[in-house]
Every structure is written in C-alpha cells, then in structure tokens.
Amino acid sequence: MKIAIFGAGQLAMMMVQADTEKKHKYTVIDPSESPPACKYAEHIQTEYTDINTIKKISNDCDLATIDFENVDVSAMKEIEKEIPVYPSSRALEICQDRIKEKDLFKHLEISTTNYCEINSLEDLKNNINNKKSYILKTRRFGYDGKNQYRIYPGTRPSTNLVSSPCILEEFVEFQAEVSLIAVRSVNGTVFFYPLVENRHKDGILDMSIYPSNYQHLQKSAEDIGSKLLDKMNYVGVLVVEFFIDKNDYLVANEMAPRVHNSGHWTIEGSNISQFSAHISAITNSIKFVKLKLKPSFMYNIISNHIAEDKILQLSNKFDMYFHDYHKSSRDKRKLGHITCTVEDKDKLKEKIKEFKSII
Ligand code: AMP
C-alpha cells in the first residue's frame, strides 16, 4: 500500500522503520527541511494545507495517517473524501481540543478532573476557588507541558494568562501517571498493551516503565479505552493518559490520537511494537495478537545529547538500545531515547536507580 504520513518527525521515522519487510511505500509530508523521517521515505516539503499536496496524496496514496495531532483538520477532511484517514478527522478534531476531549470523557462517564472553559480573565476570576490548586491550559496546541500555567491557592490571576481559549483544570493530587496504548484495526480487532508508568520532568516525559505497579487497574483502563475506540470508530493506535489519584482510581487526563512517546519501549520490549501495530491496524493486516513482553524502561534524551563515552558506559552495564533522532540540541527538544530491557522484573527498580545515577 502507499501510505501518506502527515508529519515527518521521529514518530513517522519509527513507523517506517517498523515496516522491516518493506511491505508498504511511505510519503511523509512536513514543512521542515530535513525532519527525522525524510531519510526513510519520500519527503514532500510543504505546509500541511498545501492544496496541490492534498490532491497528490488523495490521488497517489491508499491511505493517510499522522505523526502529530495538530494537523489541519480541514485538509484531512478533504483527503478523506478520496481515501481513508486513520485516525479519522473526527477523532483528530476531538483530540486537538482539550474541552472536546474532556466533554467526551464526561459523556462516556469516564472519570476526569473538574474543568471548565475559560475565554476571559473574568471567566478565570469567576471560576477560581481561592483554596484550590488549578492548571490553566490552552485548549489547543499544548504538548509537553507547553502553554500551561499552574495556579496555586490564594494567587490572583493576571490578564495575560488568557490570550487564547483555555481550559481550567483542577489540579489532581496524583500518586502516579500511567498510559494505555490501545490499538484498533480497520476490521475492528482491538488489543491493548499493559499500562506503563510515566514519570515527567518539567511537564515532559522523562521515563516510561513496564511493568507498572498498577496492573490491578488494567481492566478498568481497557474498559475506558474500549469505550473511546468505539465512540470515535477509531482506527490505529490511541493512547490514553491517566492520573492515578490518592484513592487508586484512574482519572483520564488526555488522549493522543497516534503512536506515543510512552510506547517507545515496545520496540525492544515487545514482539509487536506500537509502530508496527499502528501500521498493521491501518492497513487491516492484524490477524492474531499474542504480546510477548520484557520488563523495560525508556528514558528520553531531552535538550542536550549524551556524550559518547556515557553511552558506551551504559551499554556495558545494560541491555540497552539507543535511538538517535539526528536532531540538533535545543532546550526541551526530544533528541532521542534509550530503552533498557531487564531480565528480572524484581530488578527493575534497582536497574532504573543505577541508570539514573550514571545518566
Ligand atoms: P498534559 O499536557 O495535559 O499531559 O500535561 C503535562 C503534565 O502536567 C502531565 O503529565 C502532569 O504531570 C501535569 N498535569 C497536567 N494536568 C494536570 C492536572 N489537572 N493535575 C495535576 N497535574 C497535571
């Protein structure tokens, strides 16, 4: 099949790399000059809304998918008139807007934090209880903790906080954060990876750990995942991020309508990676799924590259897989990741501690 991927970052790169048998042909669309995926696929360097590209993709490709969620929905709707877009423009529209996303959680009776829409300083003042803690987020274009502002009890919000439509969320005092990677194929086959624990630093994912200490919540997480997949008639990988509150309940935070950073460990930690699962799901080639998993942890390389001697030192001590996205250093930019697999899950905690002490 000919597959168009909107966005040519590391996620698109790993999707193409996952197709080791080269079953499909890939075209990646991205305005930047040499994004990570351009070495592995035909690259059309253009804006996502370029009408000629939309026509070309609609004519030449069998289906389209994405590597980042903020693609232009109207462009995807145009393409959808001719070829399937997975996930659909409808699913993208929901996941691009934090209010629509949370409204869907509410509609499906999925527990989420208290929230409200904020369009002015007046709204903000009217909805803040001085005794509570909140996070104000822009409705759109927020990721990796960007466009978010913590409001502490007793603080007075100032004007410049609401320059675009926002959502005000009550701060969840969580014990941990986990994510569920859900997969649904064109023919409706569904499977889930086990919950992974995600640890963040400055709002950016620092580490994902499998197995998590929250395996007892797997069934509840899968019930939520199923509801969301069904309601959106979703095809491909969908990731649901949760807080685990103090009472051990899952509280849905947000969804990513794509392969996700918290699933990178599946490249080495699973017989089926999230990337190959996504490609198989959208090309309707999932026949039989039996996951075989290894205890693993994934560490994100952010802002600065890691010195070669350190990589060497780590590789001598761990079953370690280093993924370089070939990007230049920049503050808060994801430059690569490292996955370590661990033979004995009881040694996971100790191994993470040792890894952290070196890195
Ligand atoms: P998000 O972009 O919504 O995933 O937020 C990034 C990170 O900020 C999350 O992974 C949490 O660590 C933190 N965060 C976001 N929203 C909340 C919330 N309502 N309560 C507590 N922490 C939050």
Image (spheres, grey):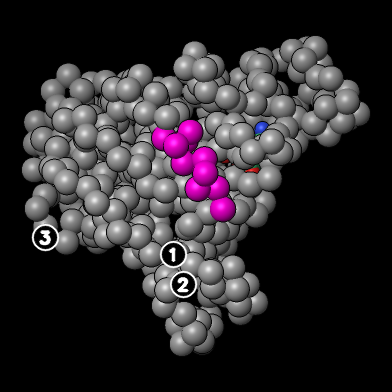
Q: Name the residue located 17 percent from the left edge and 46 percent from the top edge.
A: 288
Mark with earlier residue (2, 3): 3
Amino acid type at mark 3: Glu
Q: Mark 2 points at which residue?
A: 344
Q: Of the residues tagged 2 and 3, which is closer to the observer?
A: 2
Q: Is mark 1 on a helix, strand or loop?
A: loop
Q: In the rendered image, which quarter contains the C terminus?
A: bottom right
Amino acid type at mark 1: Pro
Disc 2 versus disc 1: distance between alpha carbons? Answer: 7 Å
Q: Residues within 10 Å of mark 2 (few under 14, many from 20)?
A: few
Q: Does the magenta stretch include residue 216?
A: yes
Q: Please name whichever residue, 332 or 218, is drawn nearer the observer in this view of the structure.
A: 218
Q: What element carries label 2?
A: loop
Residue 147 occupies which quadrant of the picture? top right
> Along the horizontal axis of the image, is 176 left or right of 337?
right
Q: Is mark 3 within 8 Å of ligand 1?
A: no
Q: Name the residue under label 3.
A: 21
Q: Name the residue under label 1.
A: 295
Q: Residues within 10 Å of mark 3 (few under 14, many from 20)?
A: few
Amino acid type at mark 2: Asp
> Along the horizontal axis of the image, is 126 left or right of 146?
right
Disc 3 versus disc 1: distance between alpha carbons? Answer: 26 Å
Question: Which span of residues is magenta-colored?
Answer: 213-222
> Along the horizontal axis of the image, is 184 left or right of 150?
left
Which quadrant of the frame does ligand 1 lie within?
Answer: top right
Q: Of the residues tagged 3 and 1, which is closer to the observer?
A: 1
Residue 57 x, y percent position in the rendering: 16, 34
Disc 2 versus disc 3: distance between alpha carbons? Answer: 31 Å
> Along the horizontal axis of the image, is 65 left or right of 340?
left
Marks 2/1 in contact by CB < 8 Å: the verdict is yes
